Amino acid sequence: MFKIKGNYPYPVLLEDNIDYKNSTIKARYLYQGLKNGHNIKIECVVDNMEIKKLIEDRKACYAVQIESPNAMYRNMFEFYNGDDINITLGNDEVIDYIDIGIAILVKEDIENFESEDFVDAYKDIKMKINKNEILGVCQNVRKIIVLDEEVLKEVHSIFNLQKDSKIDHTTYDPNYDRILIRVPEEIGNYYLTSKGNKEKITVLNSILFMPVLTSVINDMNDAEEEFSNRLWFKTLNNKINEIIKEKHMTREEIFENPYETAQILLKNITVESINEFKKLLDNQEGDDE
């Protein structure tokens, strides 16, 4: 997230008057839960004319950084027009909470950065600000997302992937509303950076989710009393009932082959991941030519 207390060698616009006499940056965060996701509207008010002119000229921009660590989600959004932006996230991109930060980023080097509103220490000093430096920043905020039964509609959403620097293997824990899968930190970081690549993330989801889901389904009948109030259990139970109705199967048949049931629930992810893996190899061979 953006650092509000960074050691900046130049004036930075903040929510309080520190480097500027009167100018400040203010932000308001409006959250709305949607049926299939989450909407965050961020309103930003900058009352410094020099910085607003830089944004209008696209030499600087508003930048919103959003993270949901428990969902291994991180992204940054930039905008220039107006003072607000609407961002919509899917249910699989948010688990438990989101961290939101907003800053003003330099988009191209500014040779003579100056303002009539600088405090006396910076008065009449012209300075160069490099691309990607921060001109203004607000305090980061955390929005807690309250789970309800409507959130966990898809099977993928029942998993919560967390990286753990203290382990060298993968493990899972069903004693939460979402099944917690812990992975070594390096694997967690790789998963995070792969989320924008369909081929990679499909293969990774198959490797991580299929064995866990198979094990969970195998234990569901015996664990009903223990886990019946967990959202992941309710989600799986609803999905299994849909399969029973659609495929004219009995509940006994569903649990006779947990692996096959897991494939149905994850929409044949093993075959899909093999196809995506083949694409990765074909692309790699093409790059080598």
Image (tube, rainbow, N blue to C red):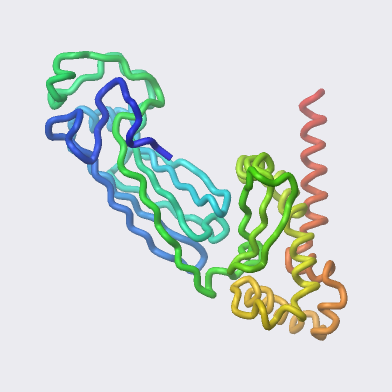
Quick check: can you spot residue 288? yes
> How far across and down, in percent of the image, does residue 225 sit?
68, 83
Is residue 42 rendered to the left or right of residue 289? left
Quadrant of the drawing holding the N terminus: top left
Q: Position of residue 224 (x, y in %)?
A: 70, 81
- Quarter of the image holding residue 125? top left
Expressed as whole percent of the image width and height from the top left, the position of residue 174 reads 67, 67
Front-most of residues 82 and 153:
153
* Residue 262 against residue 108 in the figure, above or below: below
Tell me where residue 51 appears, x and y as whole percent: 24, 30
Count how many numbered circles sit on residues in the image: 0
Q: Is residue 199 left or right of residue 234?
A: right
The image quadrant that residue 168 belongs to is top right
- In the displayed structure, 124 sits above or below 213; it is above
Task: Please name whichever residue, 277 or 67, is drawn nearer the observer in this view of the structure.
Answer: 67
Residue visible at 19% across and 32% down in the picture: 18
Residue drawn at x 52%, y 45% is: 74
Quadrant containing the C terminus is top right
- Is residue 197 in sight in this rendering? no
Residue at x-position 46% and y-position 57%: 97
Q: Is 60 placed above or below 112 here?
A: below
Q: Picture quarter containing residue 242?
A: bottom right
Residue at x 64%, y 80% (from the top left corner): 228
Front residue of 69/85: it is 69
Q: Is residue 138 above or below residue 230?
A: above
